[in-house]
Image (cartoon, rainbow, N blue to C red):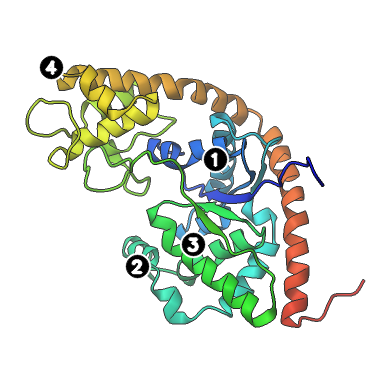
Amino acid sequence: MAGMPAARLRVLSGIQPTGGGSHLGNYLGAVRQWVALQDTHDPYYCVVDLHALTVGPEPDAVRRRTLESVAELLAVGVDPTRCTLFVQSHVTETTELAWVLSCLTGFGEAGRMTQFKDKSQRAGGADGPTVGLFTYPILQAADILVFRADAVPVGEDQRQHLELTRHLAQRFNTRFGPTFTVPEPHIPPDTGKVLDLASPDRQMSKSVGGAGVVFLQDPPDVIRKKIRSSVTDTGREIRAGEDKPGMTNLLRIYAAVTGRSITELEAGYAGRGYGEFKSELAEQIVELVLPMQARYLEYLADPGGLEAIVAEGAKRARAVASATMEVVRDRIGLLPARG
């Protein structure tokens, strides 16, 4: 109808409740974009507790970390009135679809996932990596396809998984008829990769941890110490460049936190030392996270409220997922349940 606003594209993304909360790289590279997408898209955001089982956490830890992740998402600006916020395991259609997709996935195809190779090397326990870790990308594909998402925010580390999702959607559609939306990557504004403060040759990562990772829940003094101890390069010039990976990383973080350009920062700190630069960067980060930390504690103090929020989100999510699975079951020839 003329004059009607165009339907918003649906976007799907998830965060794993692995403990420790989000770090600065998660926030600047992904979660901050989640907040912005609420203005332009129809967002579905989930805490992927089933994915967290691949690392073998204790049951009490899974429950606690799931609620902590919900509280943190709310604290940084994810708004359940402007998105669908839910917990992955509350939408059982996802695991049903994962089984269907696994029956369409070649063993070699799954084995080529580079994240499986990387995580297998870090997997603990006597038996090493699990089947769940091997099939993780298929469950991730089901997360996306069951909601018929149009777009998925991706970083470089998830690009291969999204390609698998696209292949599986196309394979199903070709074999059984048009069913799934083939999702496109949503490339967020380029903030540059946030690298480890102690080892700027690798991405900031929760699994590595240590002094090189700034968490959103770190106390101010801890943040200041981590920034003060961050690796810099030879010379005292504050500029970005391939020969100065440590300073380039710090400048990217400063630019992303403040909205100032790297060129502007380089000019502003011309002739000034590393110590002054790091001190002022640390204060900018502290100023960013302190309000988030206060809101996080408020949300965490009301676990019943958090559970009610994700229950409502799961209700909306299941309405979409169940409609998708009704079509999938019919297309693949499963006998409908009666009564």
Q: CA distance from mark 2 to mark 4?
A: 46 Å
Q: CA distance from mark 3 to mark 4?
A: 45 Å
Q: Earlier in the sequence, mark 3 or mark 2?
A: 2
**Front residue of this view, candidates 247 and 54:** 247
* Residue that badge 4 annotates: 271
Residue kind at label 3, given as amino acid type: Leu
* Residue that badge 1 annotates: 34
**Residue at screen point 77% across, 81% down:** 334
Residue kind at label 4, given as amino acid type: Gly
* Residue that badge 3 annotates: 162
Task: Tell me if I can see residue 219 in this picture.
Answer: no
Q: Earlier in the sequence, mark 2 or mark 1?
A: 1
Task: Tell me if I can see residue 22 in this picture.
Answer: yes
Q: CA distance from mark 3 to mark 2?
A: 17 Å
Q: Secondary structure at mark 4?
A: loop
Q: CA distance from mark 4 to mark 1?
A: 38 Å
